[in-house]
Amino acid sequence: MLSTYKEEQDVERGFRFIKEPSLQLNKVFLKKSERIEALMTVMTLCLMIYNLGQHQVREQLKEEKETLPNQKGKEITNPTMRWVFQMMSSITIAHYHERGSHTMGLSDNKRKIIGLFGREALEIYGLKSK
């Protein structure tokens, strides 16, 4: 019973994410119930993908016995996806006509995070597999 109660915290954390001011949902005004339902469907899908990404990052870190620094610089194996997004900021991919593309702004931690998502993610950023 206690473990079931503790699992509710994950659901509550998801709703707290939806209420996050950075999403700026307070600026969305919908009148039709169909549109409200559609927005909630999209938001639920986004939340599922967000949680799936967070789960994958955490599982891969544990599997590879790797860590990422948290906001205070302490190495951890359970970062939030929000922190991963912040760590991934300022990456630029420049596409050159007929010459391919070049990725700029990559640090070791950013390369590590991209690698946690697999070969396809490495290819998107123009990086080589391990």
Image (cartoon, rainbow, N blue to C red):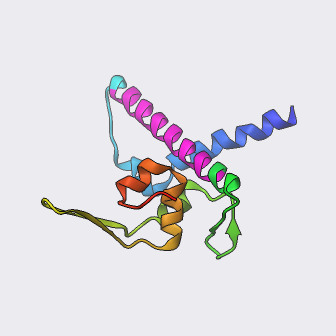
Q: Position of residue 4 (x, y in %)?
A: 79, 33
Q: Nearer the viewer, residue 31 or 89?
A: 89
Q: Position of residue 7 (x, y in %)?
A: 74, 38
Q: Nearer the viewer, residue 66 or 91?
A: 66
Tell me what residue is drawn at x 37 percent, y 67 percent: 91
Tell me what residue is drawn at x 78 percent, y 41 percent: 6
Specify whether residue 105 is painted magenta. Answer: no
Q: How many numbered circles are shown? A: 0
Name of the residue lying farthest toward the top: 34
Looking at the image, residue 98 sits to the left or right of residue 126; the answer is left
Q: Position of residue 117 (x, y in %)?
A: 51, 50
Q: Quadrant of the N terminus?
A: top right
Main secondary structure of the magenta stretch = helix
Tell me if residue 71 comes above or below residue 58 in the rendering. below
Name of the residue lying farthest toward the bottom: 73
Looking at the image, residue 34 sits to the left or right of residue 50; the answer is left
Q: Which residues are magenta?
A: 35-58
Query: Which of the 4 quarters of the picture holds residue 105?
Result: bottom left
Looking at the image, residue 40 sits to the left or right of residue 103; the answer is right
Tell me what residue is drawn at x 40 percent, y 61 percent: 127
Looking at the image, residue 76 sits to the left or right of residue 47; the answer is right
Q: Nearer the viewer, residue 128 or 48?
A: 128
Tell me if residue 117 comes above or below residue 128 in the rendering. above
